[in-house]
Amino acid sequence: MRVSLLSPLPLLALALAGCAVGPDYERPQSAAAAAEWVEPASLEPVDLSWWDSFHDPLLSRLVTQAIASAPDVRVAQARLEEARANRDAVRGGRLPSVNATGAANENVLTKNGQFPIDNIPGFARDFSLFDLGFDASWELDFWGRQQHREQGAQARAAAAQEARRDVQIRLAAEVARAYADLRTAQREVMLRREIASLLGDRAQLTDRLYLAGDVSRIDAEAAMASAANAERMVPEAQARASAAAYRIAALLGVPPEAILPELEQAAPLPEPPVTIAAGIRADLLARRPDVRRAERELAAATADIGVAKADLYPRFALLGSVGSQAVNAGDLPSRDSFRLSLGPSISWPIFNGGRVRAQIRAADARADGALAAWEGAVTGALADSESALNRHRRSQLALGQARRALASQRIAHDLARQRFSVGEDSRMQYLAAQAQLAEAELATLQAQAAELQAAIALYKSLGGGWQDDTGN
């Protein structure tokens, strides 16, 4: 059977039948996804808005503001909108293209050319030419080139959306961490001041005892050194508190003075839930945006292989042009000025120095790299989550030990106070008991801060914190 190139209908039917080349993408599966948690974990559903479980209204407000409008989120949103616009542009490439045309030219032909202009009756050497019309073209996607381009663009738009979600998760965790640092440093300032005051009193008392000849100069100098070191720790804690407040302002993208008055009001450390639900381990890979992004980038790279392979084959297109052309502008509406051009077009890269096949190899290599990146994202997500589970459990154990030590130290302090009140112990001994209690309270604060930071890290590793912005 012969198909005439002058008849576009058989060609169109053949194109629409579809002969797409290139691999068909299949979402990869990881054997690690089906395994159970290595670390002990609650299988209850993950709390996506985990910051609310800390029951700190200011923290919840800061995190909500950050994931909605922080500069990093706006940057990611702009990239997402760019990717979606590129996707829509690629989709438009599958449709026919129609352009309006118009021209008004003054022409002067040479007398010394191939044609004897002066000897042709009624043919003027100089003339005007007016043209109005429409040009249309439609590339037939016979080998799936446009189909794969659209698949790749759609996958890249989805990857940009996952990147935005990943930014939201990171911001939620960073704001919570900075807030925890702020509250920890504020409480530490109070304890450091108390310790410095107690050690200062002890240094003064030791100095008086030295002048009275009851203790050596070594004891007096050691007491003064301890007091000086304690004083030094106060401004360091104050600096950490200020740095944490400035970090929160930077994360939110607001001037420091806009939130400092509120942040400078001391408040207790937020307390995370005792049990943090980790969900089913297999669901982790479907929830973490970094893994989802890597999978979409793999899909895009796979589609690029099809685009590259389609360049090995001929391109078919339908071309058409319709309009009016006349030497006088007033004759353009006349039926005699009507012009029409319609027919198929073919383009086939017979020889290009191996460029197309090199591009196919490059696309294959990019897809291999994207697959490796996805596998790395999967294993990294699992290791991150398991490590966070372990660190959170260990931090809870350490906090329990610190609280038990603090309880024992409080009992010892009460006994020392009673002995001092009845004159059985000296003021020096009572000051030592007070300082030891303050040190135990500081150690408990540090353990509480470590447990809080471990909880935040665990929530982050579990992939909670992004908004479901399906969009278009």
Image: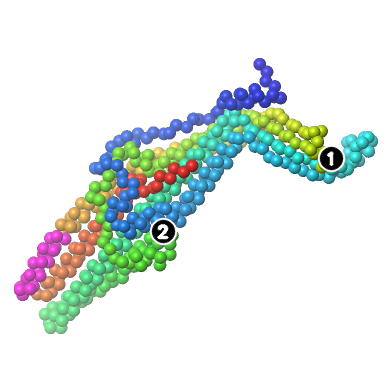
Q: Which sits in the foreground, 216 or 245?
A: 245
Q: Say if the magenta span includes residue 17.
A: no
**Residue located at (42% from left, 47% from top):** 165
- Badge 2: residue crowd in 10 Å (few <14, some 14–19, many ≥20): many
- Badge 1: residue crowd in 10 Å (few <14, some 14–19, many ≥20): some
Kind of residue at badge 2: Leu
On the image, numbered disc 1 is attached to which residue?
327
Instruction: State which quadrant residue 7 falls in.
Output: top right
Q: Residue furthest bottom?
A: 212
Residue 144, x across and y down, in percent = 56, 30
- In this orientation, does residue 99 appear? yes
Q: Quadrant of the N terminus?
A: top right
Kind of residue at badge 1: Val
Instruction: State which quadrant residue 146 falls in.
Output: top right
On the image, numbered disc 2 is attached to which residue?
252
Q: Which sits in the foreground, 198 or 215?
A: 198
Residue 332, x across and y down, in percent = 80, 39
Q: Which residues are magenta?
A: 406-425
- Give whichever of discs 1 and 2 has the lower sequence position: 2
241 up-or-down from 421: above or below = above
Instruction: Tell me: 219 left or right of 59.
Output: left
Instruction: Tell me: 239 left or right of 447.
Output: right
Q: Say if the magenta span includes residue 423.
A: yes
**CA–CA distance in space, label 1 to label 2:** 66 Å
Q: Residue furthest top?
A: 1
